[in-house]
Amino acid sequence: MKKLSARRRHPLAAVVVLLLALACTGGLYVLLAPTSEAKADTTAQSLAIDEGKKLYAVGCASCHGTGGQGTTDGPSLVGVGAAAVDFQVGTGRMPAQQPGAQVPKKKNIYSQAEIDQLAAYISSLGAGPNVPTEAQYGPEGADIAKGGELFRTNCAQCHNFTGKGGALTHGKFAPDLEGVSPKHIYEAMQTGPQNMPSFPDTTLSEQNKQDIIAYLDAVNGEDTESPGGLELGGLGPVSEGLFGWIFGLGSLIAVAVWVAARTAKAKKS
Amino acid sequence: MSSQDIPEENLPAEQSAGHNDHGHGAVGVADEKNPFADPGLPPHEHRIQDIDERAARRSERTVAMMFVLSMLATVGFIVSYVAIPHDRTIYVFPIGHINALNFALGLTLGAALFLIGAGAVHWARTLMSDEELADERHPIEAEPEVKAKVMADFKQGAKESALGRRKLIRNTMFGALALFPLSGVMLLRDLGPLPGTKLRHTLWSKGKLLVNMNTNEPLRASDVAVGSLTFAKPEGLEEHDHEFQTEIAKAALMIVRIQPDDIKDKRELEWSHEGIVAYSKICTHVGCPISLYEQQTHHVLCPCHQSTFDLSDGARVIFGPAGHALPQLRIGVNDEGYLEALGDFDEPVGPAFWERG
Amino acid sequence: MSTETTAKDSRSREKAPAGERVADWADGRLGIYSLAKANMRKIFPDHWSFMLGEVCLYSFIIIILTGVYLTLFFHPSMNEVEYHGSYVPLQGQLMSEAFNSTMHISFDVRGGLLIRQIHHWAALIFLAGMFVHMMRVFFTGAFRKPREVNWLFGFLLFVLGMFTGFTGYSLPDDLLSGTGVRFMEGAVLSVPIVGTYLSFFLFGGEFPGGDFVARFYSIHVLLLPGIMLGLVVAHLILVFYHKHTQFAGPGKSNKNVVGMPLLPVYMAKAGGFFFLVFGVIAAISAIASINPIWSMGPYRPDQVSTGAQPDWYMGFSEGLIRVMPGWEINFWGHTLVLGVFIPLVIFPLVLVAIAVYPFIESWVTGDKREHHILDRPRNVPTRTAFGVAWITWYMVLLIGGGNDLWATHFHLSINAITWFVRIAFFVAPVLAFVITKRICLGLQRRDKDKVLHGRESGIIKRLPHGEFIEVHEPLSQDALHTLTAHEQYVPAQIGPTVDENGVERKVKGSEKLRAKLSEAYYGEEAQIPKPTVEEYKEITSGHGHH
């Protein structure tokens, strides 16, 4: 309510609108432009695929096979789509450093342009979900409350009620969602990285995904309000109990020691 | 406990200290015979405030200042209550973005109370006498004469009541007293209906469509991709329905699609539709909505008590405290391509109970 | 003792100041002077650990005060309503009136959030305080005659506090607590024969139904607190009646109590401490959030969040249920749900294990005397070891109850933690027992050494032949007395098995057991004989002690 209207008046709102306008204009242009331009576009596309293939050969082929067909060390990438590549490489999960229960996120070593080239190459192996656009994951038109309900139905069981993460079997875990970009969250829902199940558009619509992302931004964003004070990790009663024991009872015992202690005696001269 | 008594000689001797009772404040004199004897209370030593009036005045001022600050804090509480809007957010390092009113009210209230307490304690510690005193203890047990008197009185009373002699009165009274609480127990009967077979049935029945919880639309088989996770409710059950909570507590469904080759359990494959399997979302342990599905291992974990089920093998329990597999719902596809139930669950969903069998 | 001089004769009454006249009025009807005579200058010993009970008493009062305030706004109803308060991420969501009114208290009643947080923080601290208070009483042996009944009152307060807490945090009907209530339903269902009926009676039908919030409400605000209030009063009366225990020291004996008088010192300190406790809890409620139900959302039986845990005092039962293997026996059309029922049975046993200990100990010692001097834990190694073993047991279960958070925060496997707890449940208490007993004996030896050879002064002296020694200073008589004031029991013997006529008597099994236990408690292995006067004299006078 207040937040939404505040967001509409946000200084960046104008920029978002401008970007949307630009995107629309660009789209119109592509539709209306002569075919020779379109051909140039496909050339650019094939160039990107070539570049992507080179990057793939260096960074990915050892596990996923030279043609992306998969090996014992890594699954086949045919048909995973650009969204999967953008997520896995963009969050630094791929290329994986060492085998383990789960490949964790780490610092991303590729530029966005290189990631796009890799994604173009992988998409050329077989069709799959595309990288979502800002219009798909942006806050515009999202219903935060509906997103909350969807989050509690589909996501909270693993990621905790405000996305703080949680444990899975044998050392696997659902990561904390704080600081994960809306695009990557969208891609994760769409593609189901590692052991996370996918939530394709057929069962969790684009609007649903947008709602979820808006909810997460509201409850697990940088300036999310925690009305009561320290959030204590947002983990529920365990951290509250620890805090109550250490700081609550702890400070009361400290006070009790002061109350019961004997007052200093005057020094005998 | 037990009537066996330990012979006196096995109990440790009373402390010698207990016998030589020094008056309080007596200065201990080293006892030549017993160096461990109780020297008595150490002499009282004065505090600075006891001998230096200036120090005492300082203490007085400190105490008074705490009381004054407490008053100011209460004023601050009232001002905060009136002045700060209840939805104002402020950033306080290192706490974060918090509600300004809660913060202000809590701190002023805390300060007002704490300072009253601190003032009182400081007063007690520095200005009130700190000379230790000793109180005598008296045995809790009554003297033998008292006990004898009580016993005699009781016997007299019991005799006068003739309770022991008039057995008819005694027995009927006990009978009446024992029976009347039954009416109280009876009154509890209407706390709830009898279970009947309610725990055995859910809203699912033959032909009911599987409705996607997210979109509130019926699910098509083609909607469900391999590796995806979807939750469904029976057609016709809406969130606004009066019985929604109670019905969804049993009917909630978890739908995943597994490559048919990966399904190890024969019945599971039969009850699926081209690898789409529908399992109860309610854990068979104590009823948490289980749904932590790992799409590569096909394991599903309960977030409450970590029961783990293998969805590719008839949802049998592979870890944790659950006692039996998740019930599977037999599904098919109708003429229009929508997923439908082919009947109710063939066993009760959720936690096990005595009559489950 | 000015109170005694108060004249009862009517002649002086007219001249008496107003305060005195009021007191006279009250005395004529309530007999307050006789009460005050015994209690106004009653002595209380000063020690910080004696104030743990006060922490509990005061947080209990704070809980009642804030709880009454909350009832003014809370609607214990499960009717579904749509949310239209100030919290955006729940706009338009369906929720019970209970949840809705809790949201209203938190966001739209000024100071409501503060009172809610004080109520909940005070509850956590109340239970934590009772736990520590109980351990203080346990480890110092303050539960011995004549205080066994008060020990039981305190224990009951702890158990009732747990359930008052459980019914309390279930009231907002949020996703987390609703999951806890669902667990409770599952646990009730597991009870053989009557479980299903109990569950239907408790919930007014199938779970969740529309009744449990209202039912929990009357249990939470009326039934349990009423019983607790009565127990608290009884507990305090007994504390007054028995007079407080004290640690051994110069001038302190089993027949006196040394400390400060109730009026004025203790009244100021104890009264002030109430405000200190309230102040600290209010400040904590200003800076730390507790039970943010708006983050969890309203309860829906088909939704859940990971990290579903109860408040800390129920954590050990959560541990029990999490690490139990899933045993289930089906026979003759019935199901015995051992995987849930066994933890349900062990849950009270964990608590009872510590509650009955005083009676076991008094049976083993056969000691029927009153004890008012506290033990130092090291001087009763077996009791101390038992207590530490129990705490270890409890902690192991707490770890089990939070196994998922351990897993994510320490990068461990949840399955490995569960297995660790399963093994530690049996092994850890035994290890803790053995280790604690050894430590206690070591400390006893050190005390003995100190008494006989004096305190290490830290001054190193070089002897003429080049040897370095540390100068030991003899202890003051105060210290000597304090270190040797404890009693040491002699193991109980079975006694002659043949009576004076040479006829063999039958030795009862219980007698044998007691002799065995007594040997374990007080045998050579279990305590270091405290130094005797002879030993001391021999060492201090025999050869020139350094």
Image: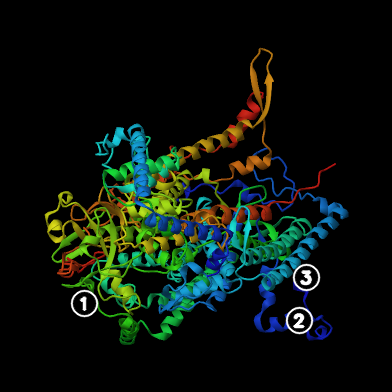
Residue at 60% x, 59% y: name it: C287
Q: CA distance from mark 1 to mark 2?
A: 73 Å
Residue C416 makes an appearance in the image: no
Residue at 44% x, 64% y: name it: C296
Q: Nearer the viewer, mark 1 or mark 2?
A: 1
- To which residue does mark 2 refer? C8
- Few, some or many C-alpha atoms within 10 Å of disc 3 (few <14, some 14-19, many ≥20)? few
Residue nearer the viewer, C178 or A175: A175
Residue nearer the viewer, C388 or C320: C320
Q: Chain of mark 2?
A: C
The x and y percentages for residue A126 are 26, 46
Mark 1 residue element:
loop
Residue C2, labelled with which disc?
3
**Disc 1 to disc 2: CB gap under 8 Å:** no
Residue at 69% x, 84% y: name it: C28
Q: Is residue C487 left or right of residue C28?
A: left
Residue B196, labelled with which disc?
1
Kindly indicate whether the residues beneath marks 1 and 2 are on one polypeptide chain.
no
- Looking at the image, what colour scheme do you see? rainbow
- Few, some or many C-alpha atoms within 10 Å of disc 1 (few <14, some 14-19, many ≥20)? few
Q: Residue furthest top?
A: C465
Q: Chain of mark 1?
A: B
The x and y percentages for residue C413 are 35, 44
Q: Nearer the viewer, mark 1 or mark 3?
A: 1
Q: Chain of mark 3?
A: C
Q: Which amino acid type is marked by label 3? A: Ser
Which quarter shows the N terminus of chain B?
bottom left
The x and y percentages for residue C236 are 57, 67
Q: CA distance from mark 3 to mark 2?
A: 14 Å
